[in-house]
Image (spheres, rainbow, N blue to C red):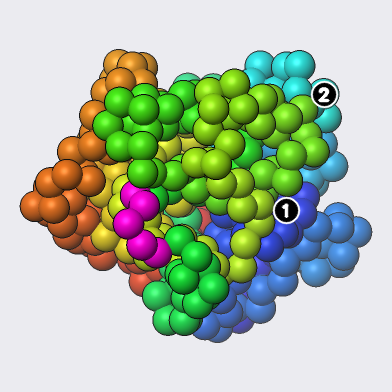
Amino acid sequence: MTRVAILTPSLAPADAVSNDILGEREVLKRNGNDVKVFSDLAPVRNFLRNPEDVLIYHHSRGWHPGVQLVRELSCRRAIKYHNVTPAEFFAGFSRTDQDLCERGRRELTDLAAAQCELYLSDSSFNMQELIAIGADPSKSFVVPPFHHIDRLSTITADQETLKKYSGDTTNILTVGRLVPNKNVHHLVEVFAHYHYDYNNNSRLIIVGKGGEGFSPYAKLLNRVVEKLGLTKAVVFTGVVSDEALKAYYLVADAFVTVSEHEGFCVPLVEAMSMKLPITAYASSAIPETVGDAGIVWTERNPMLIAESIDLFVRDSAVREALGRRGYRRYESMFTNEKAAHIFLEAMSKLQ
């Protein structure tokens, strides 16, 4: 039995990194390992006592103590890189997030220089960043993240949400934290083109933490909505239960993201699993994740996204064909079973 410590600055519900960590723990335990998740450093040193033990450090933001531990330990070490958002996205919105991202980018160089035994990345986009700053390509592998889609597929959708948003109104959905790199303010402008030029019986449903309206960015979003006269057509749900999330996917006619920076973007895979047509901008890892399961535009033109939404809504054949294609892509590449196989194969290369 191998002792494996999974190290992270924090664990949180409805968080993609946390879901990946919990998925890793389950798979490693199922394969006979002694696995513990830590966000406190002191117990890690006591747990990892032998050179054959394994540390998996998840990196998505600055956390100097964690990076120091990676550099100091003499056991086998693996990095799971989820990408670090460029700090400039948070300038003027959150000094705390800006600092965390600046440190995270600096510490990425330290992690590459630590010559760990394994470098795992959610996407090829992430892996190429690591290699570019010095990670050994022969020790670098793409491992898609674990997620909670298995749970979404089995639970019953929230009936109140289904009842409230079912009907004749076209529902355009996006899912994710309301932070500047997600470019939600631009998505509201995209929706305005669709709502006013194509279909005024439509609404934009924005699901994710930050919709409560308290942060500077959330306040900006509300001002954009008011300025465009969309107060009654844009819904900020805030954090929702899995049952409500499933309901929002079921009532949606299309999934849209115009995010400017993603290391993977799990909601795209959720949309595929629910057979929703997708349209997006071709930024960061988005084209790699979407593949042929949606319409991805290299040109940052809101009218193109609006036209894509209109196509999905008007043409049921296109909508259903993309839905089927997305589901096939999910089943062939992104199920937890597939992720487990790829993860274990990569972990077997630890020397």
Q: In the image, what residue type sits under mark 2?
A: Arg
Q: Residue at x 78, y 34 (%)?
A: 215
Q: Residue at x 73, y 17 (%)?
A: 91
Residue at numbered disc 2: 95
Image-quadrant location for residue 290: top left
Q: Check the image and report above or below for 324 versus 225.
A: below
Residue at numbered disc 1: 8
Q: In the image, what residue type sits under mark 1?
A: Thr
Q: Residue at x 67, y 44 (%)?
A: 211
Observer-nearest residue: 296 or 344?
296
Observer-nearest residue: 126 or 88?
88
Q: Is residue 39 visible?
A: yes
Q: Residues within 10 Å of mark 2 (few under 14, many from 20)?
A: few
Q: Position of residue 277 (x, y in %)?
A: 26, 49
User: What's the mark number on residue 137?
Assistant: none
Side (left or right) of 11 relative to 283: right
Q: Residue at x 30, y 21 (%)?
A: 303
Side (left or right) of 157 relative to 102: left
Q: Main secondary structure of the magenta part?
A: loop
Q: Earlier in the sequence, mark 1 or mark 2?
A: 1
Specify the segment rendered in magenta: 166-170
In the image, is residue 169 part of the stretch drawn in magenta? Answer: yes
Side (left or right) of 260 relative to 58: left
Q: Position of residue 51 (x, y in %)?
A: 69, 61
